[in-house]
């Protein structure tokens, strides 16, 4: 038995919503069309894993003025604290605040539009996952 993965309308997707979610959960390409737009439905954990791989943080954590600072290059966020952990916690809070602001009003601003992957990653991560992402080492960004 073949299950539908591509739903030609919102109505079709709504009547087969369980199938739609089941297909997305397996990692299969699953789409819904509405008027002229086509949307992909994907398991959030799978999307998060891919975003983490495609958008390494390249975070910089440094001793500064008797405390610590942490920032993600190419992202308008930074954190600071008396300890490394405090700076990381502050950076995670800044990432969450930025994601909220981006969703509420920055997504259409030309200088913020390209932060989509970062915002998705933040929204789909818990604090421990964000800390791991910040501290992960990866190839350095092009200078």
Image: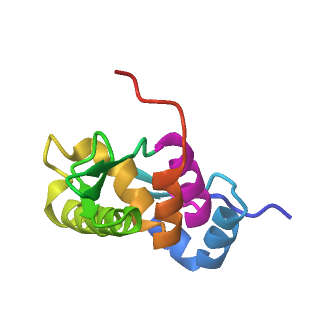
Q: Quadrant of residue 137?
A: top right
Considering depth in this image, is 58 or 124 the residue closer to the camera? 58
- Magenta residue span: 40-56
Residue 119 pos. (x, y %): 34, 57
Q: Main secondary structure of the magenta part?
A: helix
Residue 24 pos. (x, y %): 64, 63
Describe residue 89's horizontal placement relative to residue 109 as left or right: right
Residue 126 pos. (x, y %): 48, 72
Q: Quadrant of residue 77?
A: bottom left
Tell me what residue is drawn at x 34 percent, y 21 percent. Answer: 143
Considering depth in this image, is 59 or 49 the residue closer to the camera? 59
- Magenta segment includes 8: no
Residue 64 pos. (x, y %): 24, 50
Considering depth in this image, is 22 or 98 the residue closer to the camera? 98
Describe residue 130's horizontal placement relative to residue 91 as left or right: right
Considering depth in this image, is 111 or 6 the residue closer to the camera? 111
Q: Is residue 31 visible?
A: no
Tell me what residue is drawn at x 66 percent, y 58 percent. Answer: 5
- Magenta segment includes 46: yes
Vertical placement of residue 90 versus 55, above or below? below
């Amino acid at each position: 038995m073949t299950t539908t993965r591509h739903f030609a309308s919102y109505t079709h997707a709504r009547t087969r919503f369980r199938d739609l979610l089941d297909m997305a959960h397996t990692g299969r390409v699953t789409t819904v069309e509405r008027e002229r737009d086509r949307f992909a439905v994907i398991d959030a954990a799978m999307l998060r894993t891919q975003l983490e791989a495609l958008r390494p943080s390249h975070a910089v954590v440094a001793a500064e003025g008797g405390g610590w600072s942490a920032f993600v290059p190419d992202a308008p966020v930074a954190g600071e604290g008396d300890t490394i952990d405090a700076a990381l916690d502050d950076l995670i809070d800044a990432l969450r605040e930025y994601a909220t602001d981006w969703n509420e009003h920055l997504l259409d601003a030309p200088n913020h539009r390209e932060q989509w992957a970062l915002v998705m990653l933040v929204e789909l991560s818990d604090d421990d996952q964000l800390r791991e992402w910040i501290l992960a080492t990866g190839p350095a960004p092009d200078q």
